Amino acid sequence: EPGIDTEYFHPTEAKANPPVISYVGRLMKYKNAQFVISAMPRLNELVPGIQLQIAGSGDFRPELEQMVEQLGVKDSVQFLGRVSEDEKRNLLSRSSLFINPSFKEGWGINNIEANLCGTISLSNNVAGLKDSVIDGVTGLLYENDDVEGFCQKAASVLHDKERLAKLEANAKERALGMSWDAMTDKMQKAVEACLNS
């Protein structure tokens, strides 16, 4: 587990209403932002007015924009382009869900950044991401390519404010334990244990 700047990442904006879900990352095919876009028509039925805000740049953006056009979801999908760290923190803060749809990920540090901003992650249930999200405790995992399952999980938690608040609190508490200092202590103890064995 890498360390994280627990001082910098904290809520800076109120949650948007209607809800915003966000994607932050490179716009590459394997990062799979296309999955979230493909879910938007169904998600709009379940959560009217919901907005998807996509931050990041990459060579797959033209295909993603074309997909938005084809699915007729231009009113509910916004491309923000590359954003500063401050803009990213604001986006994570106003989002009700941070979506991490990547096919492969080392760990998913941006899930933890979102958690510190008071936002849970709904992530693809793949190696790396399932280590940064404790399903049903600090966030939610959905099965790869299951659009209906993804939409049902998103809608159920967005319609259950009490459950969402509990997940947010759990996520924030866990994330706060991942400061650089905490990770340094953990590493030092591990090294000492190895040296003393």
Image (cartoon, rainbow, N blue to C red):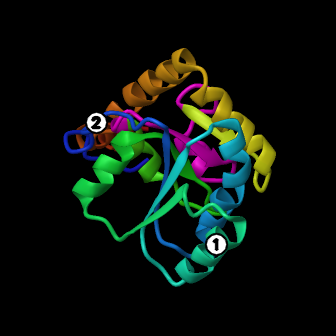
Which labelled disc corresponds to residue 165? none
Residue 195 in sight: no
Q: Residue 107 at x, y = what percent?
A: 51, 53
Horizontal relation, residue 72 to residue 93: left or right: right
The image shows residue 162 at horizontal and vertical percentages of: 53, 15
Quarter of the figure with residue 156: top right
- How many angstroms separate mark 1 from mark 2 (CA)? 32 Å
Q: Kindly identify which residue carries mark 1.
A: 69
- The 10 Å Cα crowd at callout 2, few under 14, some 14 to 19, many 20 or more, is some
**Residue that mark 2 sits on:** 11
Q: Nearer the viewer, residue 122 or 96?
A: 96
Mark closer to the observer (1, 2): 1
Q: Amino acid at mark 2?
A: Pro
Residue 177 in percent (x, y) is at 34, 31
| Callouts 1 and 2 close, C-beta under 8 Å | no
Residue lying at 32% horizontally and 41% vertically, measured from the top left: 183
Q: Looking at the picture, which amino acid does disc 1 mark?
A: Glu
- Asked if residue 93 is positioned above or below residue 177 in the image, the reply reads below
Percent of width and height locating residue 140: 62, 36
At horizontal 52% and vertical 73% (from top left) the residue drawn is 27
